[in-house]
Amino acid sequence: MSDRLLSYNEAIDEAIRQEMSRDSSVFIMGEDIVGAAGRPEFWEDLGGAYGKNRGLIMDFGPERVIDMPVSEMAFSGAGVGAAMAGARPIVDIMFIDLIGCCFDQLVNQAPKIRYMTGGGYDCPVVFKTSYGGRAIPGLPKGGGAGVHHSQTMYSVVAHFPGLKVVTPSTPYNAKGLMIAAIRDNDPVMFLTHRFLGSIGGHVPEEDYTVPIGKAEVVREGEDLTLVGIGGTTSLCLEAAESLAADGLEAEIVDLLTLNPLDEETVYASVEKTHRLVVVDEDTPVASIGRDLAARVAQNRFGYLDSPVTTVHSADTPVPYSAALEEHLPPTAEKIVTAVNEMLVAV
Amino acid sequence: MAIDIDRDKLTWMYRTMRLIRRFEEKYLELLNSGVPFGTGHLYIGQEAVATGVSAHLRDSDYIGSNHRGHGHCLAKGVDPIAMMAECYGRLTGTNRGRGGSMHITDARLGVLGVNPIIGQSMAHAVGAGMAINLRKGDDVAVSYFGDSAVGCGVFNESINLATMMNAPVVFVCENNQYAVTTPVEYAIAGNIIVRPAAYGIPGVKVDGMNVFEVYEAAGEAVERARGGGGPSFIEAVTYRYEGHWIKDDHTKYRRKAEVDEFRARDPIAALKKRVVADKDLTEKDLADVDAEIETLMDEMVKFSEESANPEAAELYEYVFSESTAGDLA
């Protein structure tokens, strides 16, 4: 592993730069990804509304780094059309909460292109967006962004055959999954956790891919399996330390891809540990966490020594007040509590 | 209008319009004889629009189409035999039986797809235009949509974006005056043709029953787009002779006098009359085309009837790709 440290956002930016250098058909478009559109004197320092793409336009020019008007429907659809016409667009949708404005393109158009054309067209578009906004270890509790800028919502997009959905959890897998997403011939939703952006990690300088559709065992253990998704993987690691102090060794599977979902890695872990807790920051109803729980209950029932358990965000919209919001998402403490309740329930 | 179109092009126009008409009539005929088509939206009456536009397009140009798209595809050059086989759900169809009438595509001809979610293919055409600009090409993308799309949010977003990006897109509004049963004057506020001016792009309203008017307007728009002049807008006022879809009885919401008025201005009859009167083509030339199309129709039906269906084992094919650009690199 490389000694070099990058933040999660820097790792994604590096992946985009390397792919744009490698392949001239790759371009990126979204709202405020450059900032100050049409005013080059501001470009060098701005790098978009959140500074995530600083300097990108200086290296690749305004033909390939393109600020969009507030038109999620048009530019998501333009991403689909450009992908069908031979380009490899990265469509930056500022927040996952905005997908209602372009839902048709995300779920009705992009995922169906290959299937409904009988393989006639590829649709190699990346929809990059951000989710979450609540308590993460080491960061202020409560994002304070309210109901429309804090949701997780990934289960909604994980529902559609043909749409790949990835949820990187570290700078390393964020870079590798972004490169894999850009090279993939199918539409990929690349979901970044809003509060993971500044976390650091070791990232090799060279380009590499982390395979889409493959989960990763990030901690080995014998006593139970914790499944983390994006932002909750670090919570699982924290909970595992606490459980270890009580003599329980948790194995942790970082799901990384929500669709197509790597059941086999989860099954293999459950066959070994006989217990499963899925930690999903989305709200519980019709969620990916419960979907995974159902798959394990249906297909590995005979291996289970305890009821399959899930830890989700509260089934409410996201409140503004930090005093409420801090109680909303999964935490390491809630995971430990869920594990203890599961063991008692045997 | 003086006709400054050569004989080959006039023959192509007649052949294309006649092919569309006969394809659609055959579709209805087959349906009535018991062929279990899922659905279908016939282009009969609107043939002059796709024909007048496609007369300026080459294979590498793109089109985005709507649910009433058979005519757009045939005019762009899609094989009617593969199209009909697709409507039969056959493996030999344009989409290997996965798309059907409302999703005909052809990647070799830039046919991005018949697309029945109103207005959404406008954004695809803009994206194709952006891809053309990215590779510094001189192809164009045509976006076909109906009067009802004018009321959609994606209409505004797509034209705004195309204009901003100076994308080589020709927006063709086929105003056939009905959204299912709802008349345009009820559903669309103001005038359609004043809208392009608000985006600062050229717009022209033409008689969509007259292939020469469409041809002239489309020629200017396509040339502008190819030359880097950005998007244009054409409103072609036209009429569908049949119902919204194959089992829709349009007499329940349209007055007979109105239908008769448009039928009296039939675009194929008008073209025929004109080319014969001007001695560009003879009755015999036209009859030869008709005969050739009838042979094609027979071949088309035979092929579709005899083609195999997809196998059940193929159900999961094409959900995801099996290769990536990484494999190719």
Image: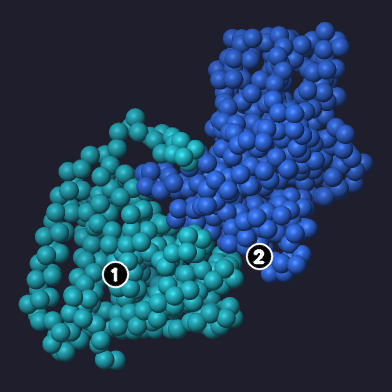
Chain colours: A blue, B cyan
Q: Is residue B224 left or right of residue A143?
A: left
* Circle number at residue B44: 1
**Mark pair 2, 1: CA separation:** 38 Å
Q: Is residue A155 left or right of residue B9?
A: right
Which quadrant is the C terminus of chain A positioned in?
top right
Q: Which residue is mark 2?
A: A69
Same chain for the residues under marks 2 and 1 in the image: no
**Residue A157 picture location, percent across and down:** 60, 42
Tell me which residue sits at (73%, 62%) in the image: A43
Q: Which residue is situated farthest in the bottom direction here? A: B1
Look at 38% across and 64% down and name the residue there. Answer: B61
Residue at image point 72% right, 12% down: A221
Q: Are marks 2 and 1 in contact (CB under 8 Å)?
A: no
Q: Position of residue A318 (x, y in %)?
A: 80, 45
Q: Nearer the viewer, residue A203 or B62?
A: A203
Identify whether B105 is placed above or below A69: above
Within 10 Å of disc 1 (Cα), the crowding (few <14, some 14-19, many 20+) is: many
Q: Amino acid at mark 1?
A: Ile
Q: Secondary structure at mark 1?
A: loop
The quarter of the displayed image where residue B3 is located:
bottom left
Q: What's the residue at 52%, 41% (across, down)?
A: A183
The image shows residue A277 at horizontal and vertical percentages of: 71, 21
